[in-house]
Amino acid sequence: MAQERLLWPPRNLAEELPRKVSGSLAVLPPAVLLHAARAAKRDLRLSMRELDSGQVVVLVFRRGEPTMVFSPGDGRSVGEMLVAAGLLDEVQLARLLEERRASSTSLERLLTERANLTHGEVQRFLDYQARLRLLDCLAWQQGFFELAEYTGGGETTYRLQLPSIEALQNRAKSRAERLPRFLGRLPCAPAHVVVRRKRGAEPPATGLAREIFELLSQPLLLPQLMARLLVDDDLVLEVVLDLVSAKVLVMYPRVELAPPLPSQAASGDLWASQMVSEILLRFRGGDSGGLVRSLWVVVVSARSEEATRLVAKMGGEQVELVFHNSELPVALLARSVAVGPNARLHLLALQPDILSPAALAGVLGRCDAVVLVRTSASSEEEQKLAKLRQMAEGAGFGWRPLIVGWDQGASFRPWQEYPEAVLAVPSLGDADPQWLAKRLLEALLAAASARH
């Protein structure tokens, strides 16, 4: 009974909500925070971070109603889903993103004006995106949150059409129980799974199975199928797997996957694992208590490709996005790097000017560390990096991420305002990924030590 009462926020949390509050999701679960934000009927930003995965979800509220849900790097941006659904191609989206960067116009407005999409079509994708991200975070039991007053830009003008919090919470619980089981039956990661009709198979009679069969007039990747259906991923996977078992559909990897080498399976070393534990001890006052200790690091630069190059050079497991054309600009690149038997670095390269202010501030304010990549030490670059640093230090209120300066391409040079630790790497060209990861860990430990 006590647990059921937690589904609703204490009365004073909604009525006497301060301008900013932060804490643990183990104490105030996501559903409680959503109820509190809605009951407050104020303009707010809620940032939540799951402890083990490092995933961040940022919600923007206008007078208590959610208007946008961000989760940079999760592969579910509206643009990515429109590409997967076949409503845009990658070149069109790249041009729209470039125009958005130059004009500061919202991507949604550009989609209706330049891509001939209706407001209704864009709204359906926004609602679906928000729903999946909420289903993710409503299942979280460990992590951190921050709820603060927020006066934003275009992201506060939308109105999402979502089910009740109770309905979403029930759906999130069911999805969290079922999804791992379905993913375990796939031949590889969902982004690489191709689904097609089995030759001569009879179409199902009705329902979602019939709809899936009709969409597969040509083979599709699972993300493409889901973007055309706009149905919860666990429900789609359940039906697809049943149809495969019934020999109506065929499922196979898009590419031949080579088994990992023995050295890859046990990447990293005990020294790096111990260093992660020491960073957590000095920075958070302890570690996550889980089997795998992880640090979530955001990498930013004045020139976006430098942050992307650095994260790509670190190696690790790439978090698959929809895009596969390497010649197009990459707004986000996420990697998970094993630095020891039970320690990981979650790295996210951000292109700051492509994100909403709410999303950028929410992510910078809830990560463990921000790495500022500097290449020239010009006054313009220094100003941009200083602005990003101020956003990181001011966005989290009670939470301050570690700030590390990464000097790329030269020896140490003076900074206008020194980060908590500075690392200089002459070149990424021949650098070993494990060597880079260890140098980053050393800088993070120095930054954590500087706090004491």
Image (cartoon, grey):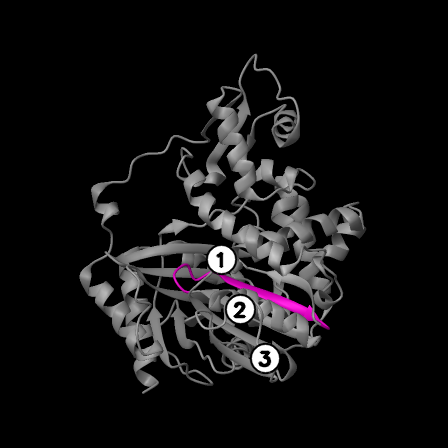
Secondary structure of the residue carrying tag 2 is: helix
For the point 70% across and 57% down, which residue is it?
107
Q: What type is the residue that disc 1 sits on? A: Ala
- Cα separation between marks 1 and 2: 17 Å
Q: Is residue 267 visible?
A: yes
Q: Is residue 193 magenta?
A: no
Relative side of 117 to 72, left or right: right
Q: What type is the residue that disc 3 sits on? A: Leu
Question: Tag 1 or tag 3, which sits nearer the N-term?
Answer: 3
Q: Give the crowd class for mark 3: few <14, some 14-19, many >=20 residues within 10 Å.
A: some
The residue range painted magenta reads 51-63
Quadrant of the drawing holding the C terminus: bottom left
Give the total number of marks visible in the rendering: 3
List the single residue furthest toward the front. 1
Q: Which residue is mark 3?
A: 13
Against 206, is 300 above or below?
Answer: below
Residue 289 location, quadrant = bottom left
- Checking the image for residue 5, the label placed there is 2
Secondary structure of the residue carrying tag 3 is: helix
Q: Which residue is mark 1?
A: 139
- Foreground residue among 320 and 37: 37
For the point 61% across and 58% down, which residue is it?
166
User: In front: mark 3 or mark 1?
Assistant: 3
Secondary structure of the residue carrying tag 1 is: loop
Against 258, is 65 above or below?
Answer: below
- Foreground residue among 42 and 382: 42
Q: What type is the residue that disc 2 sits on? A: Arg
User: In front: mark 1 or mark 2?
Assistant: 2
Question: Tag 2 or tag 1, which sits nearer the N-term?
Answer: 2
Q: Are marks 1 and 2 in contact (CB under 8 Å)?
A: no
Residue 325 picture location, percent across and down: 54, 42
